[in-house]
């Protein structure tokens, strides 16, 4: 069986690194590139973090391209990212020095090049704000058809994380998210709510200490920091959210998906950056199509597969097994 | 123990009927006034229903006042279907000689708040227009009200828009005013209701033999039009016995601007504001997460005993 070509667009980030590790360990995934965006830290930092991780695993062959430094309309607000991931975006692990550099090409152009040259459709896995993917859709709309699907970590079906009504990746750049969700490419949305369902517990994290591989060691170092910042938010389990977007490519059966209407809110006083997800089957006594025509003056569409349930045990097992292979 | 003075603001309404019935049967509260607001039907219809309910429950001494005929920024938009043509399914109650107060709802609320010297509670189970007007008109009212109990909103799904609930959506601006008053707020939303679902035949089983025949007849005929939990009744039940619900304290904000999300009650269950800061509400509300159906049924059984005459 040929491997699935995947581009990981990310802002590492502790959970991003778990996602990258799942992809590196999987014999189903061929990582075509890692592209970076601002988000958990500056794009310079997230790029350096990505290179550090690839070097650590001896995978300098995977091209890294640096992407957007700021969201579409406003400068990056770093305060929340610093609280969760520290100053560098990846506080905790200390990586060896190396000479790896990003390619001399913007993220959007590397993604475009790969899509253009690929015979198979490519899966894109955005794990941070959707700046680069929005730019791709705007610059190269003709390449959308070369995307198999997008499996992204972001958004919320109910409550948020960075605000009570929005999830961080979407909140950082709602306009870019809007472009992506309206883009017509199939999307699987691993929301903050669904990824919370797949949170790992102390016992799982403890078990990683017994894994004598590079992956196991890095996982423990990452969690040493990440559990502290999670506990500061009164969390008793740890959501390594981004890893779900990659786990879906490896084993979609871990997730229950509802294909429905999702629109990103851009204007709410409180709900800006919310992925407004239609979870009902009927509304105000009408079928959804009639309801959307009457109240939102547009069609009801199923533009997104929202994850509504996750197999926490299966996910933890997949992560653990992946760490053992690295 | 002295009873708590309360104003009951309502848009009867099938579930309003049973909320009122529960509240009226309780020794915990002294209903100082009932005020009406459009929502489940027009002001005219819900006020006529209110007069009929007042008569049916043989109330006296409680003020009954009509409220706003429009919402604060929007006209009244009665949803088709949910409460039937009369607002009580197809039941038309005889209002008898029940008279309305000369004063409007917001003036009655203010007067009763002044009289109660800081002890007044408001139980509001319709759109919050009357309360919004009252707080807008009387700046000192927020210092005079002890607590506001609201049926409205949701921590999860809505019934108007993907997340909006009708009472808040009908007048999100009024809701925004109320939630920003700083007065302790108890919120029972759609998320908490499913355990308290009750069908007409289940209700009939809870009624004693000697219940007043007109009361019984009206209850059961109203229930013929109802197929989901009696939201307002669950709300009253949850404050008559606060063990009936599981509660959390969290910030609640009302969205008023976005066409996609206006009317949503954003409940900060994850504690985002405590950790990341942010704008909006600065006082936590007491929000029902789920409810206990058995206690609710027991409460109905006890309630019906008070309507045997």
Image (cartoon, coloured by chain):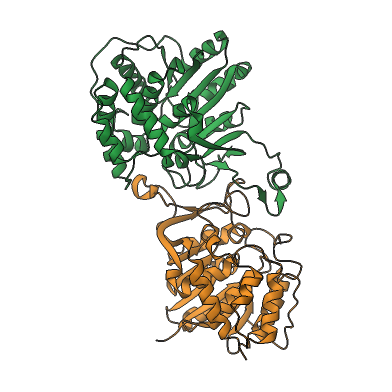
Chain colours: A green, B orange
| Residue A47 vertical placement versus B207 (above, below) | above
Q: Which residue occupies 46% across, 56% down?
A: B252
> Height in image: B296 above or below B251?
below
List x then y, in percent, for residue A103: 41, 10
Total residue callouts: 0
Drawn side of residue B94 relative to residue B146, left or right: right
Q: Position of residue A117 (x, y in %)?
A: 55, 8
- From this viewpoint, is residue B32 visible? no
Q: Nearer the viewer, residue B98 or B158?
A: B158
Residue B184, position as x, y percentages in the image: 42, 67
In the picture, the quarter occupied by the C terminus of chain A is top left
Q: Is residue B121 left or right of residue B198?
A: left
Residues B63 and B218: in front is: B218
**Which residue sits furthest bottom?**
B309
Q: Which residue shows up at 51% across the image and 32% down it?
A: A253
Q: Where does the image place residue A324, in percent across and percent down from the top left?
A: 31, 23
Picture quadrant where residue A68 is located: top left
Residue B61: tell me if it is visible: yes
Q: Is residue B108 left or right of residue A215?
A: right
Identify the residue shown where x is 33% and y is 45%: A235
Residue A265, by quadrant, is: top right
């Amino acid at each position: 069986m040929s491997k699935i070509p995947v581009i990981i667009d990310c802002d590492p980030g502790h959970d991003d690194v778990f996602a990258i590790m799942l992809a590196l360990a999987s014999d189903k995934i061929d990582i075509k590139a890692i592209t970076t965006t601002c988000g958990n830290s500056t794009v310079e930092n997230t790029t350096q973090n990505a290179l550090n991780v690839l070097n650590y695993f001896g995978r300098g062959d995977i091209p890294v391209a640096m992407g957007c430094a700021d969201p579409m309309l406003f400068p990056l607000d770093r305060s929340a990212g610093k609280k969760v991931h520290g100053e560098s975006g990846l506080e905790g692990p200390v990586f060896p020095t190396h000479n790896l550099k990003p390619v001399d090409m913007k993220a959007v152009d590397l993604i475009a090049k790969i899509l253009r040259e690929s015979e198979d459709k490519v899966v894109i896995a955005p794990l941070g704000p959707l700046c680069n993917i929005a730019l791709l859709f705007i610059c190269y709309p003709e390449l959308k058809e070369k995307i198999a699907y997008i499996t992204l970590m972001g958004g919320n079906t109910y409550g948020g994380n960075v605000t009570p009504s929005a999830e961080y990746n979407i909140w950082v750049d709602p306009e870019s998210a809007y472009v992506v969700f309206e883009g017509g490419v199939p999307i699987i949305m691993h929301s903050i709510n669904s990824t919370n369902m797949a949170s790992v517990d102390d016992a799982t994290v403890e078990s990683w200490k017994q894994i004598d591989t590079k992956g196991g060691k890095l996982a423990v170092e990452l969690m040493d920091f990440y559990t502290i910042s999670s506990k500061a938010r009164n969390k008793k389990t740890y959501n390594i959210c981004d890893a779900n977007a990659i786990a879906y490519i490896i084993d979609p059966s871990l997730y229950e998906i509802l294909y429905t209407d999702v629109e990103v809110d851009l204007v709410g006083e409180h709900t800006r950056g919310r992925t407004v997800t239609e979870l009902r089957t009927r509304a105000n006594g009408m079928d959804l199509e009639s309801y959307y025509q009457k109240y939102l003056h547009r069609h009801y569409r199923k533009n997104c597969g929202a994850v509504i349930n996750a197999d926490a045990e299966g996910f933890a097992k997949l992560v653990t097994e992946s760490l053992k292979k690295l | 123990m002295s009873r708590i003075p309360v104003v009951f603001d309502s848009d009867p309404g099938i579930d309003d009927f049973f909320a009122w019935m529960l509240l009226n049967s309780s020794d915990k509260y002294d209903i100082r006034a009932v005020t009406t607001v459009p929502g489940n039907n027009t002001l005219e219809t819900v006020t006529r229903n209110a007069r009929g309910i007042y008569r049916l429950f043989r109330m006296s001494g409680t003020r009954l006042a009509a409220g706003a005929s429009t919402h604060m920024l929007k006209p009244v938009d009665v949803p088709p279907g949910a409460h039937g043509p009369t607002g009580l399914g197809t039941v038309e109650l005889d209002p008898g000689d029940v008279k309305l107060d000369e004063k409007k709802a917001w003036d009655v609320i203010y007067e009763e708040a002044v009289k109660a010297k800081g002890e007044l509670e408001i139980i509001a189970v319709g759109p919050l227009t009357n309360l919004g007007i009252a707080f807008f008109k009387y700046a000192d009212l927020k210092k005079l009200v002890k607590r506001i109990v609201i049926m409205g909103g949701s921590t999860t799904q809505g019934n108007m828009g993907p997340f909006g609930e009708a009472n808040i959506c009908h007048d999100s601006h009024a809701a925004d005013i109320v939630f920003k008053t700083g007065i302790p707020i108890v919120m029972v939303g759609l998320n908490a209701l499913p355990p308290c679902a009750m069908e007409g035949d289940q209700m009939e089983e809870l009624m004693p033999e000697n219940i007043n025949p007109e009361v019984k007849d009206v209850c059961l005929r109203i229930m013929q039009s109802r197929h989901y939990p009696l939201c307002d009744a669950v709300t009253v039940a949850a404050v008559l016995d606060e063990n009936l619900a599981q509660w959390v304290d969290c910030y609640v904000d009302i969205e008023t601007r976005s066409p996609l999300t206006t009317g949503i009650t954003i409940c900060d269950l994850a504690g985002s504001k405590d950790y990341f800061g942010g704008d909006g509400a600065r006082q936590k509300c007491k929000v029902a997460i789920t409810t206990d159906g058995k206690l609710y049924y027991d409460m109905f059984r006890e309630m019906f005993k008070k309507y045997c005459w």
